[in-house]
Amino acid sequence: MDIKLFEKESLIKGFSLFFIVIELFLSFIFYNYYRLEEEHLSEEIFLQMKNYSFFFDDSRFDMDIVPKVKESQLYELYFDDKNLYIFVPLLDDKENSLEIIYPLSKYKAQLKEIQYSLLWQFLSLSIVAILISLLFAFYALHPLRKALNLLEEFIKDIIHDLNTPITSILINLKMMKQNEEVESIAQSANAIAMLHKNLAIYLKDSNFQMENVSIKEVVDEQVKFFQPLYDYLVWRIDIKDKVVLSNRNALSRIVYNLVSNACKYNTSNGFIEIKMQDSKTLTIKNSSYGIKNPSKVFDRFYKESDRGLGIGLHIVDKLCKELNIDKKLEVVNDEVMVTLVFS
């Protein structure tokens, strides 16, 4: 597995989750705090209006004499499109009431000041939340990173130790008298060797040495391996002897996994077609039962059946990016075609 990519994805997910939780909590707190401030402002203006009705010493308020209102309407704060106002009784006047008025625009301006103040506080705490989320994500990821590194080293050791017995088996099989049983064992040993190469290059750090590689040699090598295993398929090979600047081992892994997939997910009376469209374009086409999710086939561990590990096409995707090879997958009816364009 790509440890660095997995760590990056885990870090982003952990950071995002923790940050979202903190932001939701802060949003809830600040929303309720704003509602309280809004109520507090209304209550403060109301008290100031009442005080003004006794002393008339505040230039912020206006007043008007209106017909007497009901007793239940006195000393209540009201809003309309332009003003805030209250009604208070007029001494020795049973026919009229006094209306104390405060402009709505001034009230909204005070609310804006509160909003800006709370917004700056919210943004400041959000920055703190980002730092806390990063620290938490790194802290939570540390034991997982350590375990993954140990697992990667363990897998690398196993792969390294397998190399010697696999090579020994293949060498001794070549020295044995060839018969049907020996050929069957050789095929199985070669399959294990191919899987070993797949795993080895999957865990290899990205630092491939570029060299001149014959596409025909790479394709012929893989066809020679797969054709006896899938002799019921019709094989159509048309490869010109073209040389590209690449890495032979990595390119072999790309072709191996594409041909392997084309064989495993083929039909009982299907075909495999491998040809060069031009000097820099290689296509691998096969009959199939179709692909449910073509956009996901190169994702790590994605499988549409129980067969395989789900890493073959992900290796293709990874190596194509590292070798600067453009790839394209097309599904037309019951035919699948992968196109590789070399730079």
Image (cartoon, rainbow, N blue to C red):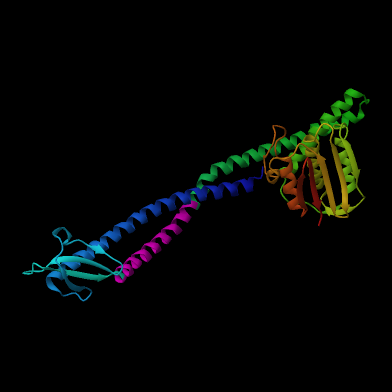
Residue at 21%, 64% (x, y): give it: 46
Residue 214 visible in the shown view: no
**Is 133 displayed left or right of 184 in the figure?**
left
Q: Is residue 308 above or below residue 14?
A: above
Q: Magenta segment, principal secondary structure?
A: helix
**Is 7 displayed left or right of 70 in the figure?**
right
Residue 340 point in image, percent of width and height? 80, 50
Q: From which residue to which does the magenta span run?
A: 105-133
Examine the structure image and report whether residue 154 is included in the region drawn in magenta: no
Tell which residue pokes out farthest to the left in this image: 92
Q: In which quarter of the image is residue 227?
A: top right
Residue at 85%, 38% (x, y): give it: 271
Residue 135 point in image, percent of width and height? 49, 51
Q: In which quarter of the image is residue 188?
A: top right
In the depicted view, which residue is nearer to us: 267 or 323?
A: 267
Residue 155 point in image, percent of width and height? 68, 37
Q: In this view, does 159 lie above or below 140?
A: above
In the depicted view, which residue is nearer to us: 332 or 326?
A: 332
Q: In this view, does 104 lie above or below 287?
A: below
Locate the N terminus by quadrant.
top right
Residue 104 visible in the shown view: yes
Residue at 80%, 34% (x, y): give it: 267
Q: Is residue 272 above or below residue 59?
A: above
